[in-house]
Image (cartoon, rainbow, N blue to C red):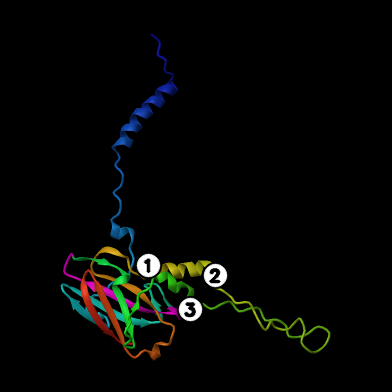
């Protein structure tokens, strides 16, 4: 009986039988851990004593340092006129974990009865600036008027249009700040991050600061240096 397979068909069938078992034998890669999926926050310092202040809360230690209007990230330091920043860190025993949330922190400024609640980092973006970036200088215009003296079309514009940071640079700045903020949820300790508090004045007017923590790791009040 004559075979119904041509040489090309026979090669195709053989390839299918070889490929299918190989594909079936492959296992999907394991998904990354939650901590690896969202690597946010600041690199924690070696010990709580390396921060401006620290306080014990049960088995945990809360540490913090006031940064003023500076927004320090691992890659660059920015500023925000409308917000002040505190770098916080939570330390614990070996292999300890804690649920992290910016809602656990508040800041009492100048002894006010009502402490300032922490704010989402996105709210600081409108006032976020890079002190290293300078707008390009406009080409100098000739002040020589056409057809004689006096003010003319050749004079500099007294009301030049504002120059904004290029969108790619602004996006990179915002991403760096985002990565330095707190990764909320259950996290392996130690964890450190930047948190934001609304404050429009000059930091020279601040005479006292208290960072208040009330969360799963307990409660603590830290006196910070303005």
Q: Quadrant of residue 108?
A: bottom left
Where's residue 121, x and y in %?
A: 40, 71
The reply to whether discs 2 and 1 touch (Cβ–Cβ < 8 Å) is no
Identify the disc placed on residue 179: 1
Within-10-Å neighbours for mark 3: few <14, some 14–19, many 20+: few
Q: Which residue is mark 2?
A: 166
Number of numbered discs overlaid on the protein picture: 3
Q: Quadrant of the C terminus?
A: bottom left
Q: Which residues are magenta?
A: 79-95
Where's residue 72, x and y in %?
A: 38, 76
Is residue 25 visible in this depiction of the protein?
yes
Pick whichever, 215 or 136, lies toward us: 215
Quick check: is 85 in the magenta stretch? yes
Residue occupying image coordinates x 39% and y 72%: 75
Residue occupying image coordinates x 16% and y 72%: 59
Q: Quadrant of residue 137?
A: bottom right
The reply to whether discs 1 and 3 touch (Cβ–Cβ < 8 Å) is no
Q: Which residue is mark 3?
A: 132
Does label 2 or label 3 sit earlier along the sequence? 3
SS for dot 3: loop
Within-10-Å neighbours for mark 2: few <14, some 14–19, many 20+: few
Does label 2 or label 1 sit earlier along the sequence? 2
Residue that sits furthest to the top in the current view: 1
Residue occupying image coordinates x 29% and y 83%: 210
Identify the disc placed on residue 109: none
Q: Quadrant of residue 163?
A: bottom right
The residues bearing labels 2 and 1 have C-alpha atoms spaced at a distance of: 20 Å
Pick whichever, 166 or 204, lies toward us: 204
Is residue 49 visible in this depiction of the protein?
no
The residues bearing labels 2 and 3 have C-alpha atoms spaced at a distance of: 14 Å
């Amino acid at each position: 009986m004559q075979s119904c397979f041509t040489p090309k068909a026979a090669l195709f069938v053989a390839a299918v039988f070889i490929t299918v078992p190989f594909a079936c034998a492959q296992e999907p890669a394991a998904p990354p851990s939650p901590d690896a999926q969202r690597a946010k926050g600041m690199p924690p310092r070696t010990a709580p004593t390396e921060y401006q202040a620290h306080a014990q809360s049960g088995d945990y230690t809360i540490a913090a340092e006031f940064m003023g209007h500076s927004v320090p990230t691992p890659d660059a330091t920015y500023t925000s006129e409308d917000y002040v920043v505190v770098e916080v860190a939570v330390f614990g025993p070996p292999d300890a974990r804690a649920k992290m949330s910016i809602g656990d922190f508040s800041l009492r400024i100048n002894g006010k009865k009502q402490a300032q609640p922490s704010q989402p980092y996105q709210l600081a973006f409108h006032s976020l600036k890079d002190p290293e970036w300078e707008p390009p200088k406009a080409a100098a215009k000739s002040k020589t008027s056409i057809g004689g003296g006096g003010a003319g079309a050749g004079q500099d514009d007294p009301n030049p249009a504002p120059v904004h940071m290029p969108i790619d640079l602004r996006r990179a700045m915002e991403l760096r700040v985002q990565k330095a903020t707190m990764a909320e949820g259950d996290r392996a300790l130690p964890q450190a991050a930047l948190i934001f508090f609304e404050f429009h004045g000059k930091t020279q007017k601040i005479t006292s600061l208290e960072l208040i923590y009330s969360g799963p790791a307990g409660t603590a009040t830290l006196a910070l240096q303005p």
